[in-house]
Amino acid sequence: MLDREISHTTRQKVFYIVLTPTAVGAGVFLLLGALTPLGALASAFAGLAAGAVFALFSAAGLHAGIEETENELRDLIDENFSETIYEKNKLETILRYMTDGTVAVDTGGNIIHANESARRILRMTDEDVRRKSYDDIILRFTDDLTLDTILYDLEGGDTLGSFSYGGATYDVSFGVFKDSYGKDGGVVIIFRDVTESQKLKDIQADFVANVSHELKTPLTSIKGYAETLLAGGIDDPSMAKNALDIINDEVDRMKRIVNDLLQLSRLDAKRQVWNMKEADVIALVRMAAKKQGVTAGSKRQQLHLFVKDRSFTLTIDRDRIEQVVTNIISNAVKYTREGGRIDVEVVRDEYWLYIIVLDNGIGISELELSRIFERFYTGNKARSGDMSGTGLGLPISREIVEAHGGNIVIESELGYGTRVVISLPIKPAEQNPA
């Protein structure tokens, strides 16, 4: 009875015992839990393969060890899976909120991924992304950025491109991405909207050209008359006076250009000093109109002033607002033909005072009207001839008025005239309705 119990107990606790004829010569491997269960099992099989193994395992211990290892592996897999999901979500969030459009294309031209910005830029729907190739999409806008063209450029080391569509300009960069085997998996293409920066470059280019022209003209005139004086004209009193008068006028013109540039620089840098005091706006407008009356008279124009109030006081920088009104009336006189008419009116309501300048001059085209407040924009020189300036007057005027809490609105029709409305707040700006 005792022998049977021992035998039964042994069978419960012993997994296997292996003895071979060469056990003594080859050595003994006794594994009783000194190694991890899976490691012990691997060592036992290695010993069996060598032909001389004695292995003893506790069945209960092996089962518990395998279960523990299984739990560890499960925890490790869960941890790695969670980390993968986290990285995936992070990447998707970054791509979703990128202002640059990002498109991933496989080697067959299929769209793998397109973020929201790319869908907006390329006018792509979900159906487009699922069913259309990259070339089908990009050929709506340009034929310079097809997949074959991009791959050809990449072979030559070129990673940049660009295209324009619908008034917008985009810079494009691209590069190859690898798959899990290190082979080319496709191309990532990034679209960046550079419309505003391109517009700024164009404005700067126009500025250099315009200012160079505006400065070159008086300088050429000054040099020409100076040479005339040096060549003997100074001995002729009439010729000398005429030359000096022209030189003086051209110097004044250059001075105005430089002053405009300096004032614009101060406004940009928020360094403009405002002398805010109570001032009579009606008197200010009368003075500005009177100053331009001489020029209007020389062109046989009718310049009329309409005001209901004898006076009206606002807290403003008087000199700066007079500068604005003078500039607007001056433009009306400048761009109105001989014998034309300019009306200046001052009206007000509970919240705003309006200075309105209306002319029946040459007018402004719709395209030019959309750009009229761009710095250095001078419009169509073929139409305006020598009357165009540096294109700084209106931008400066708008900045001055906006600094007072007001605004300037210009309405015009080519060939029929222009209407300019300067609005100044009567009450503090925050109390005025939009």
Image (cartoon, helix red, strand yellow):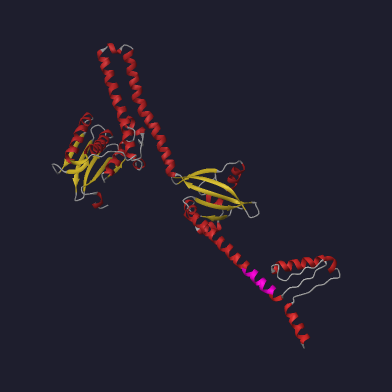
Pick whichever, 276 or 301, lies toward us.
276
Q: Which residues are magenta?
A: 61-71
Give the quadrant of the N terminus: bottom right
Pick whichever, 355 or 280, lies toward us.
280
Q: Quadrant of residue 271?
A: top left
Residue at the far left: name it.
Answer: 310
Does residue 49 appear to the left or right of 118 in the view shown? Answer: right
Does residue 96 appear to the left or right of 282 in the view shown? Answer: right
Q: What is the x, y in percent for residue 362?
A: 29, 36
Identity of the residue drawn at 32% across and 33% down:
262
User: How would you classify the magenta stretch by its main secondary structure?
Assistant: helix
Residue 357 seen in this snapshot: yes
Residue 364 seen in this snapshot: no
Q: Quadrant of residue 238?
A: top left
Residue at the far right: name it.
Answer: 21
| Residue 65 counted in the magenta span | yes
Q: What is the x, y in percent for residue 207?
A: 38, 34
Q: What is the x, y in percent for residue 424?
A: 23, 45
Identity of the residue drawn at 60% across and 44% down:
154
Pick whichever, 17 or 237, lies toward us.
17
How many numbered circles does the render carry? Answer: 0
Identity of the residue drawn at 14% across and 43% down:
309
Q: What is the x, y in percent for residue 80?
A: 59, 62
Identity of the residue drawn at 82% across and 67% down:
52
| Residue 385 counted in the magenta span | no
